[in-house]
Image (cartoon, rainbow, N blue to C red):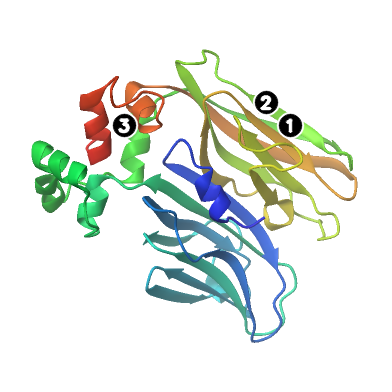
Amino acid sequence: MSLALRHLEAVRYPPELLPSAEYVSPAAEKTAEILNLTRLPPGILVRLKDVGAERSNNAELRFKADNESFEVPAAAIPDLTEPTQYDLLASKSARLSVYAIADLSNYKVWHGLLVWQQTIADKLALEIPLTNEERAINEKLGVWKTVKRGTLPINWDRIKLYEHFPIYRETRSIRKTLPTTGLSLDTIKPRKPGDQFVVLEKVSCDGVGLTAADNVRLTLCRDDHGSAATPLITLNALSMKLDFDLPMFIPAVREINLRLECDQEQANYRCRWTFSIMHLTNILKVRWGLLSKEEMPELWEKCKAGVV
């Protein structure tokens, strides 16, 4: 299922890297949408990144982030084994589509969407007007000086390195018969709720030999978001390979549930996933709304400013 506005509205522990794995069948000279966010929710920024697609002389990937558009022929891209080097920031809208030079059948694409809440540093860098409260924090902390110097806003890699400390990271895998009733893969929980949280970081499914009629899919639910009938995230296994782990960053403070579903039984089906258990720090508690402004006013201002 394509990422949509409801997925952005379900982001509770930003930044979150949401994954998508799809396939489309546009006719010649037609376009099929993979991602079409015509309007982002207020206060949200996204990066369209980690885009992988099937190598084909008959396909062209088309990107749009706000008013910037990009087109890349699929003839020379990695063949679903690593992402293309696109990392596109958007504050208003984001789009990814496939243009068919000739007829395409079950053309495979996956991508990531990094989602986070705007900070004062983000807004200054992008020339988005500040509220009265934000202007006061900006002057108090001198955020504009650090933005002008070029060390703010903080990028995603730095946030992961300095603010997400893994206690341990683990990869699990299966090779089992997948019945049409589905298969529960895992329920991932922190060992010390309240002091730790879990993050799903990678998944990989065997797409070799599958057809669209098999309809094998991996589904994900976390905390109060999603159920077996209506999961938070659904990934189509046909668009994936065991040669590559689809990157993601989906935190949960209570649990993450993974399932496999299919329309036709699969013998000896293979899948793997990687997760971490991490410290739930005060910075993250404030950023995620688990501690209020009244409880930690100084840290709240720093998180709002984007200096931590």
* Label whose residue precedes the other's in the sequence (2 or 3): 3
Q: Quadrant of the C terminus?
A: top left
Residue position for label 3: 162
Label 1, secondary structure: give it: strand
Q: CA distance from mark 2 to mark 3?
A: 27 Å
- Residue 243 rendering spot, x and y as whole percentages: 64, 49
Residue 39 sits above or below residue 231 on the image: below
Residue at 52%, 60% in the rendered image:
51
Residue position for label 1: 185
Residue 171 sits above or below residue 266 on the image: above
- Residue 253 rendering spot, x and y as whole percentages: 52, 25
Type of amino acid under label 3: Tyr
Q: CA distance from mark 2 to mark 1?
A: 7 Å
Q: Quadrant of the N terminus?
A: bottom right
Do the residues bearing badges 2 and 1 touch, measured as CB atoms within 8 Å? no
Where is residue 133, by image quadrant?
top left
- Residue 280 rendering spot, x and y as whole percentages: 42, 22
- Residue 267 rendering spot, x and y as whole percentages: 89, 42
Type of amino acid under label 2: Thr
Residue at 28%, 45% in the rendered image:
119
Label 3, secondary structure: give it: helix
